[in-house]
């Protein structure tokens, strides 16, 4: 049985659209768990009324993506789940997506995690994610890069990690490597999970026939800048990539901050610049978890 875990925080229309798309799936044999991160009570009641067979776990505070998913994962493990599909609440899945992911996930005992082809919602053929790879400098190779899908990523292939907005994982992998690291809170937590899975001998596979549309991911915000900056540094430190790699990353961050500070075309980056500075300071002071003003 596949357990689908969705983190919810307000945005009623998004979660309703997401659930409707799941229930149109051609795949049988799944249960849905919504882990709600302290949304408004009326939203939780509405979800329960519209989808009475969906399990809703209500958190008293916003625990973030990592810890919120961990609560759902614990529930799924206790219920005997064979696999877990993690979804963002702002995605629309293709009716064949779950089945295609499941088929590839269980095609080889060495495969531990699989992810779909992700498009931008509203631009039905513009690619957002096709599985990600690192270059030799541990810089993300954003292969999709908002390209039009012309079939250039239609091959099943191994990648370094797959986006956390849709990730299917065997429960045996979780039992072996553990849950999401809550120190990330959000962003880079799926990269860390995939990295640990690969170190444990599992493959991460991109599945192009599994398709999905994501409403988020189109723009950055100051808070995203904070978590992306701090958590990459934390990832490098956690996995012992060495001081030289960390210093190179810090130098790149500082160059970006200086550019945002002095170049006229980046005058609207003032808040993001400040959050990047805060991220570096917090990393140096070993502050992890949720951002604190």
Image: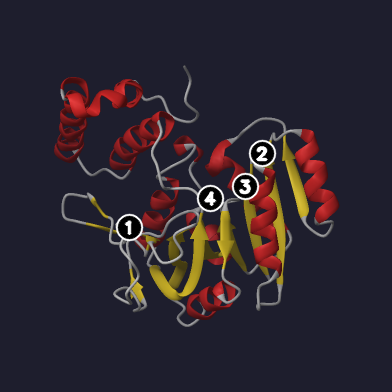
Task: Give the mark, 3 or 1, whose residue is nearer the N terminus.
Answer: 3
* Residue 146, disc: 1
Q: Nearer the viewer, residue 112 or 225?
A: 225
User: Mark 3 touching mark 1, by CB under 8 A?
Assistant: no
Graded by Cα atoms within 10 Å as few (under 14), some (14 to 19) or many (20 or more), the crowding at tag 1 reads some
Q: Nearer the viewer, mark 2 or mark 3?
A: 2
Q: Nearer the viewer, mark 2 or mark 1?
A: 1
* Residue 179, disc: 4
Image quadrant occupied by the N terminus: bottom right
Graded by Cα atoms within 10 Å as few (under 14), some (14 to 19) or many (20 or more), the crowding at tag 2 reads some
Vertical order, 57 against 172 (above or below): above
Q: CA distance from mark 2 to mark 1?
A: 28 Å
* Residue 250, disc: none
User: Mark 4 touching mark 3, by CB under 8 A?
Assistant: no
Give me the residue at 19% from left, 56% from top: 135
Q: Nearer the viewer, mark 4 or mark 3?
A: 3
Vertical order, 61 against 278 (above or below): below
Give me the residue at 31% from left, 25% from top: 268
Q: Nearer the viewer, residue 109 or 102?
A: 102
Give me the residue at 40% from left, 42% from top: 219
State the residue position of label 3: 7
State the residue position of label 2: 10
Task: Give the mark, 4 or 2, whose residue is nearer the N terminus.
Answer: 2
Place of residue 155 in the rendered image (x, y in percent of width and height, measured from the top left): 34, 79
Q: CA distance from mark 3 to mark 1?
A: 25 Å
């Amino acid at each position: 049985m596949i357990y689908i875990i969705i983190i919810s925080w307000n945005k009623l229309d998004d979660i309703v659209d997401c659930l409707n798309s799941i229930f149109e799936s051609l795949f049988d044999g799944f249960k849905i768990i919504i882990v709600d991160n302290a949304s408004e009570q009326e939203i939780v009641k509405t979800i329960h009324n519209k989808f009475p067979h969906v399990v809703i776990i209500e958190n008293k505070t916003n625990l973030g993506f990592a810890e919120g998913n961990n609560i759902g994962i614990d529930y799924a493990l206790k219920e005997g789940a064979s696999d877990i599909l993690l979804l963002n609440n702002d995605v629309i899945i293709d009716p064949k997506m779950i089945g295609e992911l499941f088929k590839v996930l269980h095609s080889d005992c060495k495969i531990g995690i699989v992810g779909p082809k992700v498009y931008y919602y509203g631009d039905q053929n513009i690619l957002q994610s096709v599985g990600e790879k690192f270059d030799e400098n541990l810089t993300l190779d954003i292969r999709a890069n908002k390209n039009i899908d012309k079939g250039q990523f239609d091959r099943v292939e191994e990648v370094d990690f797959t986006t956390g907005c849709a990730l299917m994982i065997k429960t045996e992998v979780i039992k072996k490597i553990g849950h999401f690291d809550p120190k990330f809170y959000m962003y880079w937590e799926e990269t860390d999970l995939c990295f640990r899975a690969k170190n444990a001998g599992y493959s991460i596979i991109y599945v192009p026939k599994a398709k999905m549309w994501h409403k988020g991911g189109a723009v950055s915000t100051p808070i995203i800048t904070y978590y992306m900056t701090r958590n990459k540094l934390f990832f490098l430190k956690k996995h012992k990539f060495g001081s030289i790699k960390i210093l190179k990353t810090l130098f790149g961050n500082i160059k970006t901050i200086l550019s945002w500070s002095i170049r006229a075309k980046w005058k609207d980056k003032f808040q993001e610049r400040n959050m990047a500075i805060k991220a570096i300071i917090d990393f140096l002071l070993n502050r992890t978890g949720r951002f604190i003003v």
